[in-house]
Image (spheres, rainbow, N blue to C red):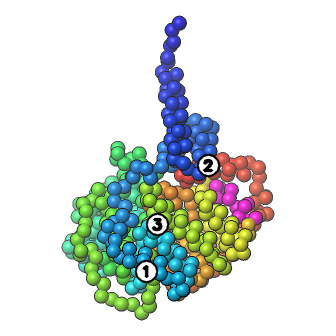
Amino acid sequence: MSFIFSPVKIFYFFYILFVLITMIRLLLDNKSPEATVGWFLALFFLPFLGVVLYLLGGVNWKQKKILKHLPEKRFKNELGPILEQQKAFTSTLTKEIDTDILKTMTLSLQSGNSVLTINNNVNLFFNGEHKFSSLLKDLENARESIHMEYFIYKEDATGKKIAEILKRKVQEGVEVRIIFDGVGCFNRMSWKFKRNFVKAGVKTKYFLDPMNVISGRLLNYCNHRKIVVIDGEIGYTGGMNIGDEYITGGVRFNSWRDTHMRLEGEVVHILQTVFLSDWENSGGAPLHDQKYFPRLAATYNRIVPMQVLVSGPDSDWYSLEKLYFNMISNADRDVYIQSPYFIPSSSIQNAMETAALSGVRINLMITGIPDKRIPFWVAQTYMSTLFAAGVHIYLYEKGFLHAKTVIVDDKMATVGTCNMDIRSFHLDYEVNVIYYDDVITKTLKDQFFLDLKQCRQLTEKDMKKQSFLTRLRNSLFRIIAPIL
């Protein structure tokens, strides 16, 4: 009896074999039971698509690093003695400092090698007009170096204006380097626009270029950071990329609400370290010259303690997820959260529900006018249990809300690039600044209440009004929540 193997049968044989191997790998990864079951269901009920989704978002890259030069490791290598001193110092602070603040400081030190800096100055921006006005002035005044990395850089009026300044600064002898994220900047600018950067002497690199044969397979892992460091003395980071919409709202929105920061002082050297690590990871030559870390002579009117915390898919710990969990679960009175997207991990959802059930007022504000429909639909699947626990949920409807902030008990806050979603926690490279300062915390909280005037409070009744088909659609898309 002879067996005839057609190409189709051979294909299915290898497909089934691959699925079985993938399932074994899933078991050996020791993910949470719900995550493992979720991926099993995706592999069984979404033939072929489930495999693609797993390769994009399910592979445990902690076992095989994506990047060689993580900022956290560079912090440890170059600031090792300081880190050890701070870890020893915080272990002795039991009465002199608020317990919750101490926990957050220690967590950031232990999970992300995040040095506490004190001699700093901060300016907060809540719209693109103010942020870009300040940034353009600082770029014009650059003397030695300009380092930039952005998830999105658009070839529009704002992008062209910045490009002209950068090209002119090169002619003046300023070193200019830019890192573009391969996915975020894909199709955002023409080849001519990028080529003109290079021709002008601006050094450019792509972070995991999707068009590269080797790094293209990693296109689901994006550099979501937004960093500018000028002369090693002035830094910018926060939610805003480069584009007109951050000023005008763009074509789709009446306005754009975001939060960004201008930093001076010791903290800028930490941002510089993050950039230099990402530059090397993007194929740039190693940069260790002390000129990128000038001595900071300036002193400021107030002491502003802060830490810079980074995280990525191959970090030792998902530091920013743990930061959010720690801040929420240790809150005593109230928590104010702003995020355009809300697809929480099970631990973050549990922290919010537990805190709310414990009497802490949890206030969650997300965008009510989405730029991406699927994440907005998936967010709604989490609302029922949050409502049952007593969480207050608001939809911002004046324009698009893109701010990423968490404020706790009027005593600490974090602002940065990390959304309240699984993608930011587990898949993207992010950076946040943590503030232990009542003035900054009050400023952020005051802005939250201003934004609240532009919100509609979502209720449990709103969720019950949804049709069966709407709820089914939302729940089906929740299956792919890990890569949204």
Q: Earlier in the sequence, mark 2 or mark 1?
A: 2
Q: Nearer the viewer, mark 2 or mark 1?
A: 1
> Helix, strand, or loop for circle 2?
helix
Are the residues flagged by discs 3 and 2 in contact, CB closer than 8 Å? Answer: no
- Give the labeled residue for mark 1: 89
Residue 129: percent from left, percent from top = 47, 77
Q: Which residue is mark 2?
A: 33
- Mark 3: few/some/many CA within 10 Å (<14, 14-19, 20+): many
Q: Are marks 2 and 1 in contact (CB under 8 Å)?
A: no
Name which of mark 3 and mark 2 comes first in the sequence: 2
> Image point 52% across, 78% down: which residue?
102
On the rendered structure, is 308 left or right of 146? Answer: right
Q: Are marks 3 and 1 in contact (CB under 8 Å)?
A: no
Report the magenta residues as a range.
Answer: 376-388
Disc 3 target residue: 111
What is the three-letter code of the residue carrying label 3?
A: Ser
The percent coordinates of residue 422 (x first, y second) are: 55, 58
Callout 2 amino acid: Pro
User: Disc 1 marks which amino acid?
Assistant: Phe
Give me the residue at 43% from left, 50% from top. Answer: 63
The kind of secondary structure element at disc 3 is helix
Mark 3 or mark 1: name the one nearer the start of the chain: 1
From the viewer's perspective, tell me whether residue 365 is left or right of residue 414.
Answer: right
In the depicted view, which residue is nearer to us: 396 or 318? 318
Q: Residue at x 53, y 34 (%)?
A: 20
> Does the rendering let one see residue 52?
no
